[in-house]
């Protein structure tokens, strides 16, 4: 018997209300009953994305919606900018490479934020750029990028702005329309506190113009077919019915709490976790001037293997936190504070991180992280 705590930046824990919605008997996807739920989800996602643009649903995880964006907007040989500050930014480059799209890369050291001016310079020099791909919250390093400024730069060019907000949406402020984001992509298993397997894409009128010209191959991911189906309150193929019903409930809960209140609470939690980590004598991995509120990236002290810390927490105590990805493997661990993850979960995470690190020989005073966590949360 083991009790599980999921403190990873996706998947995130699912509230019981959402889990029981998911467990309802399967509705046929061509019924009016399901059609109503589906359209409610599409409309609800417009609130979550803060957009009046079209919202499309893709059956598949966040990466499916990323790939769908590339194949629907572009043609082979098109030139794009990929502005990356970590593993997920690099994913845009990998997808573009797979389809023969020419990438101009804007990169910074992992742990730093993208400098919008670097994007501006390429756009000024190269009028052929069709799209700028970037990441809102870079989950691998903990950074939040300044999408608002990037949006102002891209909006007056021919290019469209495509933003991965898979981990940021819901918990970190994101305003699709006000920030001139043409295509925003998210997934079900992070801030949306639902099971993995569904993703959503917003498409602006400027992006639809590119879709009209795109010749990259697509069938299942065809945006135009998706849009047409929505007019009939349907999806082109069999959607993940139970996930749609689950997200329907999750959106209801998000709307009830309001995005503003969620952003506020998440920021408060993030501050408390960061302070707790520091009072344990540990270092925050990324540039704190650009740190996101959804995940805390923690550098491991010399000689401590982060992978082993993650493994011990998971196997012995049932607590899942994330390790480092790619070149950060073993060097950092990450504790998420998004979706249904709450202060009560985090107190468990901080407390046992302390315990496990002490076992690995790190000199941490018992309770120091938990003490600070409480103090910061209670501070007026
Ligand atoms: C989780 C995540 C994704 C998508 O990953 P999937 O495993 O395909 O859902 C994309 N971008 C970011 C920033 C993420 O955090």
Image (cartoon, helix red, strand yellow):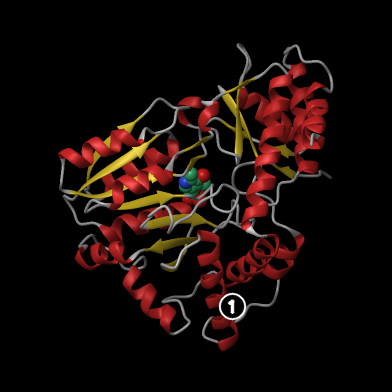
Q: Is residue 260 above or below residue 376?
A: below
Camera-side residue of 58 and 191:
191
Residue projecting furthest to the front: 380
Task: Give the x, y percent position of residue 106.
Answer: 30, 34
Residue 198 shows in this picture: no
* Quadrant of image for the C terminus: top right
Q: Is mark 1 within 8 Å of ligand 1?
A: no
* Quadrant of res 251: bottom right
Camera-side residue of 232 and 31:
232
Residue projecting furthest to the bottom: 32
Task: Give the x, y percent position of residue 224.
Answer: 32, 72
Q: Is residue 361 above or below residue 285?
A: above
Residue occupying the point 76% across, 44% down: 4
Residue 235 shows in this picture: yes
Using residue 69 as the reference point, say whether residue 213 is left or right of it: left
SS at mark 1? Answer: helix
């Amino acid at each position: 018997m083991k009790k599980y705590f999921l403190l990873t930046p996706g998947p995130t824990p699912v509230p019981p209300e959402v889990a029981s919605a998911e467990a309802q008997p399967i509705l046929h996807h061509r019924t009016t009953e399901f059609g109503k739920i589906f359209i409610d989800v599409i409309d609800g996602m417009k609130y979550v994305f803060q957009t009046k643009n079209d919202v499309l649903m893709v059956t598949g995880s966040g990466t499916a919606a990323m790939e769908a964006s590339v194949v629907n907007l572009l043609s082979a040989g098109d030139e794009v900018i990929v502005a990356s500050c970590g593993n997920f930014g690099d994913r845009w480059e990998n997808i573009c490479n797979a389809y023969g799209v020419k990438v101009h890369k804007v990169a910074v050291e992992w742990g730093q934020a993208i400098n919008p001016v670097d994007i501006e310079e390429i756009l000024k020099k190269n009028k052929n750029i069709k799209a700028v791909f970037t990441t809102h919250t870079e989950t691998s390093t903990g950074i939040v990028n300044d999408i608002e400024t990037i949006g102002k730069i891209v909006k007056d060019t021919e290019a469209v702005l495509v933003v991965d907000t898979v981990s940021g949406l819901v918990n970190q402020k994101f305003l699709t329309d006000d920030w001139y984001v043409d295509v925003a992509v998210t997934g079900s298993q992070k801030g949306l506190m639902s099971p993995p397997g569904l993703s959503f894409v917003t498409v602006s009128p400027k992006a639809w113009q590119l879709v009209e010209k795109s010749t990259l191959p697509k069938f299942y991911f065809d945006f135009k077919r998706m849009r047409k189906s929505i007019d009939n309150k349907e999806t082109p193929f069999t959607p993940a019915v139970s996930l749609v019903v689950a997200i329907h409930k999750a959106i209801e809960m998000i709307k009830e709490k309001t995005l503003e209140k969620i952003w506020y609470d998440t920021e408060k939690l993030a501050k408390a976790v960061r302070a707790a980590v520091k009072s344990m004598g540990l270092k925050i991995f990324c540039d704190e001037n650009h740190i996101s509120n959804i995940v805390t990236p923690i550098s491991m002290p010399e000689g401590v293997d982060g992978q082993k810390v993650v493994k011990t927490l998971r196997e012995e105590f049932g607590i899942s936190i994330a390790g480092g990805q790619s070149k950060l493997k073993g060097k950092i661990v990450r504790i998420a504070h998004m979706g249904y993850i709450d202060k009560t979960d985090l107190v468990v995470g901080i407390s046992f991180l302390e315990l496990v690190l002490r076992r690995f020989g790190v000199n941490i005073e018992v309770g120091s992280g938990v003490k600070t966590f409480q103090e910061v949360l209670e501070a007026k």
